[in-house]
Each structure stands twice: as C-alpha cells, then as structure tokens.
Amino acid sequence: MSAEQQIEAAVFRRLLKHLDQRKDVQNIDLMGHSGFCRNCLSDWYGEAASEAGLEFTKDEARERIYGMPYTEFKEKHQSPATEAQLRLMDESLVKNRQAKDKG
C-alpha cells in the first residue's frame, strides 16, 4: 500500500470514529448541510469493494459504516425528521445533482 493510500485509510477510519462519537448528528442533517450521510458512505464503501473485486451486501456495508446493524442504529439513535430538515435535505440533493451535472 502506498503512503497516500495509508493516509487515506487512516483518514477514513478517523471519519468513521468521529461519526460514531457523534451519533447525535442525524443523517438528514448531514445530508442537508454536507450533501452526504452515513448511508452515502456505506454505498460508496460497497461500490469501492465491488471495484476491488469484493462483494458486500448493502447491510454489510452499512454495518461497517455504522458499527452496528443499521436497524439497531435507527432504533437507538435516529429521530423522526422535521419539515425543516426534509426541506434542507431536498435542497441539498438538488445541489448534488447540479454538481454531478457539471463534473
């Protein structure tokens, strides 16, 4: 593994640790403010694994990101979304599509 790959892997592990320490931050807030959430990370994880010739189910990828089964995380840490959160997330999704169209 190259030095760059080692750094990227360490950064990814730190991001997962940070998200694990901040379970109070809802996915919908992540989506609304940053354009991605834990579910996005799990999708990207599964896609990268597939590109490397490995197969992860959606549930396996989510468990890697959440540190527990997704259903358990939702039960313990996810609260219902407010109208404001939903509106902000919708606006963020539009920005994601616009950015994707540009690049």
Image (cartoon, helix red, strand yellow):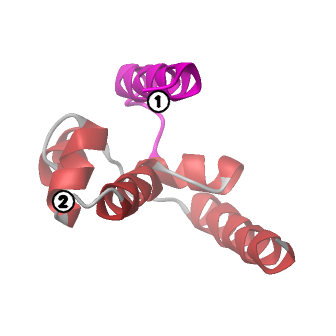
Secondary structure, mark 2, is: loop
Most extreme residue toward the front is: 2
Per the image, is 13 magenta? yes
Q: Is residue 21 left or right of residue 99?
A: left
Instruction: Look at 65% across and 60% down and name the residue there.
Output: 84
Q: Is 12 left or right of 72, judged from the image as shown?
A: right
Q: Main secondary structure of the magenta part?
A: helix
Q: Amino acid at mark 2?
A: Phe
Circles 1, 2 touching at the beta carbon (< 8 Å): no
Q: Residue at x 38, y 19 (%)?
A: 21
Q: Is residue 57 above or below residue 52?
A: below
* Rendered view: 9 above or below 81: above
Give the residue pinned by disc 1. Answer: 12
Q: Which residues are magenta?
A: 1-26
- Give the percent coordinates (x, y) of residue 103: 82, 71
Residue 80 against residue 66 in the figure, above or below: below
Residue for badge 2: 56
Rendered location of residue 3, percent (x, y): 55, 19
